[in-house]
Image (cartoon, rainbow, N blue to C red):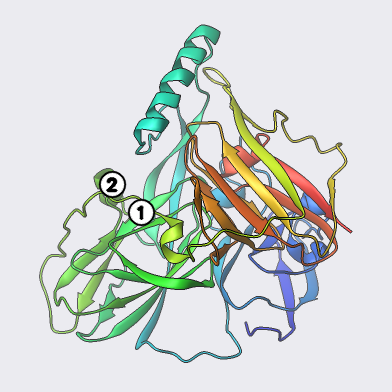
Amino acid sequence: MREGVPVTVDLFNDTDSPELVHWHGQIILADVDGAAEEKSLVVPANGHLRYRLTPQPAGARWVHSHVMAMSDLSRGTYTGQFGFVYVEPKSQPGAYDQEIFLATHEWEPFYTSAEDAEEMDPQQKARMAELAAELKKNDKPNGWEIGYQRFTINGKCLGFGEPVRVKEGQRVLFHFLNASATENIQLALPGHMFQVVALDGNPVPHPQAVEVLDLGTAERIDAVVEMKNPGVWILGTPKDDDRRDGMGIVVEYANKTGQPRWIKPAKSVWDYTLFGDNRTAPAPDEVIPLVIGKINGGTGGFNQWTLNGKVYDEKAEPRILHKGKRYRLAFDNQTDDAHPVHLHRNSFELTNVHGKPTGGVVKDVVTLKGFKKIDADFTPAMDGLVLFHCHQQLHMDYGFKLLFNVT
């Protein structure tokens, strides 16, 4: 699409169930945003829907099903109903030789009782120990989690499909999308560095080189890689089991052959502030505390997720916001799970990450690590209903949502 140039959208639903199609990261009217909570237009079962929208802002966006899958692992973002959307900017200098779009996704989901533990610092581990003691006292274990049998980049498992073909000396602009229903991922390309130039499609104030990319569910990263280490390599996840099950793609230099090589990268901590300004943001007009909690579902049950102590209630009145005012979303994750949280129809600016002031990093998804806090400021762009939720499908389905109404 082109920034600011209206397009006609035709949606054809060849399934027997109504569908919602969400234009993720675009600032558009609520009726075409594709969320039931915002009273968006529904694509009827075995039906067709047509409307107009004006793509904005420029950058890497995406489109995906936004139905509440609940316990049905054949619906919502568990499916292949998603795609990259790139909104061409009005001005694009093109300081690269190739432009490549890579989307990660997992298939064949199943229920499991195993939790996917993340790396934690001493403070997180201490809080985790306290939480374990509380759970033992309450005698209610964790509920269902989701596992997968197949992992892909652009729909192909590692070793299948065509490699990414490059030439020595090229500058390649990679657009990465984590299109998973539930999984946060890391990606590395041995012998190469990623020069991160944009997050969620928005240029960062200070592009920086990193060895490992970290993408929460629904996050996008644009990064330039200078091709100066000839060979045949694996671009993939550092998790050996997931890479074995498909999460990777071969990068092949011209005139190079042989088995693709993988070298495990050193452990690293992803830091949003690396790409931002070192400054303190001005005081907002209002602070909105958002404390994230978890109610364990127990064996054979589903966990529930709370914001400020409450599970989402579709009958509750949405919180009123005023267009033109600056609001600070004060995220406080009081669980051991990482949560990629998403605000519809708006972008927000990170202003404080884990106690460190920052500015200039604009996103529509930010991943909250376990027991961590992040502040993000935004000024509502349009009137109407605005949904906020965790982009982990299982968390969104079971309570992790909040509705605003901008007037």
Q: How far across and down, in percent of the image, does residue 20 sit?
A: 72, 56
Q: How far across and down, in percent of the image, does residue 275 sit?
A: 44, 65
Count numbered badges in the picture: 2
Q: For residue 5, which quarter of the picture?
A: bottom right
Q: How far across and down, in percent of the image, does residue 353 sit?
A: 50, 50
Q: How far across and down, in percent of the image, does residue 227 sit?
A: 23, 79
Tell me the CA gap for discs 1 and 2.
Answer: 8 Å
- Identify the residue at image location x=51%, y=89%: 92
Q: For residue 215, which quarter of the picture?
A: bottom left
Quick check: 386 above or below 170?
Answer: above
- Identify the residue at image location x=19%, y=67%: 233
- Identify the residue at image location x=65%, y=34%: 398
Pick the front one: 66 or 157: 66
Which comes before the other along the chain, label 1 or label 2?
Answer: 1
Closer to the eye: label 1 or 2: 1
Pick the front one: 332 or 138: 332
Query: To which residue does mark 1 refer?
Result: 186
Q: For residue 288, which quarter of the picture?
A: top right
Label 2 neighbourhood size at 10 Å, few (<14), some (14-19), many (20+)? few
**Marker disc for residue 239:** 2
Indicate the secondary structure of the residue bearing disc 2: loop
124 horizontally vs 322: left or right: left
Indicate the secondary structure of the residue bearing disc 1: strand
* Quadrant placement of the N terminus: bottom right
103 horizontally vs 140: left or right: left
Amino acid type, callout 2: Lys
Residues at circles 1 and 2 in contact by the CB criterion of under 8 Å: yes
The answer to whether any part of residue 175 appears in the image is: no
- Identify the residue at image location x=23%, y=63%: 234
Quick check: 354 above or below 362?
Answer: above
